[in-house]
Image (cartoon, rainbow, N blue to C red):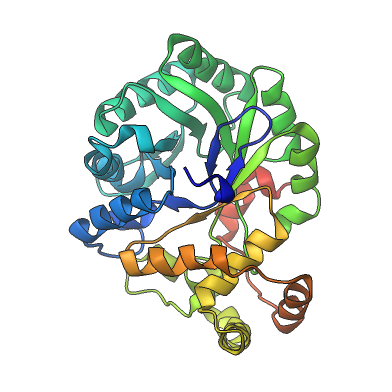
Amino acid sequence: MDTKHTVKLGSTGPEVFRLGLGCMGMSGMYGAADEAESLRTIHAALERGVTLLDTGDFYGMGHNELLVGRAIAGRREKVQLSVKFGAMRGPDGSWGGMDLRPAAVKNFAAYSLKRLGVDVIDIYRPARLDPNVPIEETVGAIAELVKAGYVRHIALSEVGAETVRRAQRVHPIVDVQLEYSLASRGPETSLFPALRELGVGATLYGVLSRGLLTGSKPTGAGDFRAHLPRFSGEHRATNEASVQALHRFAQERGLSPAQLAIAWVLARQPGFVPIIGARRVSQLEDALAALARPLSREDVSALESLVAFTGERYGAEQMHMLDSERP
């Protein structure tokens, strides 16, 4: 591992490469994906020193874990697997809420281990809170998996500071996964300071705001971005002006829009780990180049003064369910 570009996940977690690879988009969430190119992208990431692969058992109803399992076969020693679980899916792709009962936690883990083709999951985390199950019970069940050797570290996703505090009383938490970008800066106010106080790291997804910052647009009905406020309605035109300003700023500095967006996150949150949702080798190479082009404090301030994004990151119903968005 290139130690110049590594960071420790919290006070109790592993050392990981400065950028992680998010694999969700390789299983249809943003429209059709090229499976062969997805495998090439994962292999290229590992060859370039990326260690953290982020997946979820519900991405493509198991497809993503099977894909990642194929990609890491024979390369397990290079990989730190971060797996989200708990979201229920129907055969038609519908969403059925969360199930984080202790028995369900162990059931999910058993299937993930099998699909991934591994004996242990490095970082295991519930994707959201289950309103019917106290977080202490869920974390307690994962702690039993840690004791039994099936999981190495426990993490959380999209939770608020109080939930992290409660979870920490049961077992050390290495990081919380949160959406963060120029267009999603909510965690800065109180959540990031609380994590640092608690010695908990953060893995940051959506750093390109699901392609908004690079000018990407929904590709059709199968692309779930078509249902997100920032990509539609009155917000679309408003955000387009900020996207154009960001692109001009990037061009003036010889950066791609993606490199600028990633470099901003790296500058703003140096102790945390951005998760890059590259689906192609070219996207991966573009993202990794941001590590060699850090932004100055003056660049960060200048960029922030140019952009003003509007619209929530999810629809109202989903936003209401997010523990991380509660005051």
Q: Residue at x 24, y 53 (%)?
A: 39
Depth order, front residue of 296/172 = 296
Q: Residue furthest left?
A: 36
Identify the image quadrant of residue 140: top right
Depth order, front residue of 300/254 = 254
Q: Is residue 158 visible?
A: no
Depth order, front residue of 308/198 = 198
Identify the image quadrant of residue 285: bottom left
Is residue 240 rendered to the left or right of residue 168? left
Against 192, residue 103 (above or below) is: above
Q: Is residue 35 visible?
A: yes
Q: Residue at x 62, y 40 (%)?
A: 176
Q: Residue at x 75, y 47 (%)?
A: 192
Against 7, residue 267 (above or below) is: below
Q: Residue at x 26, y 26 (%)?
A: 114
Against 134, residue 200 (above or below) is: below
Residue 303 lies, in percent from the top left, at: 71, 79
Q: How many marks?
A: 0
Residue 24 lies, in percent from the top left, at: 38, 52
Is residue 165 rendered to the left or right of residue 114? right
Residue 227 lies, in percent from the top left, at: 46, 67
Is residue 316 rendered to the left or right of residue 60? right
Residue 273 lies, in percent from the top left, at: 58, 49
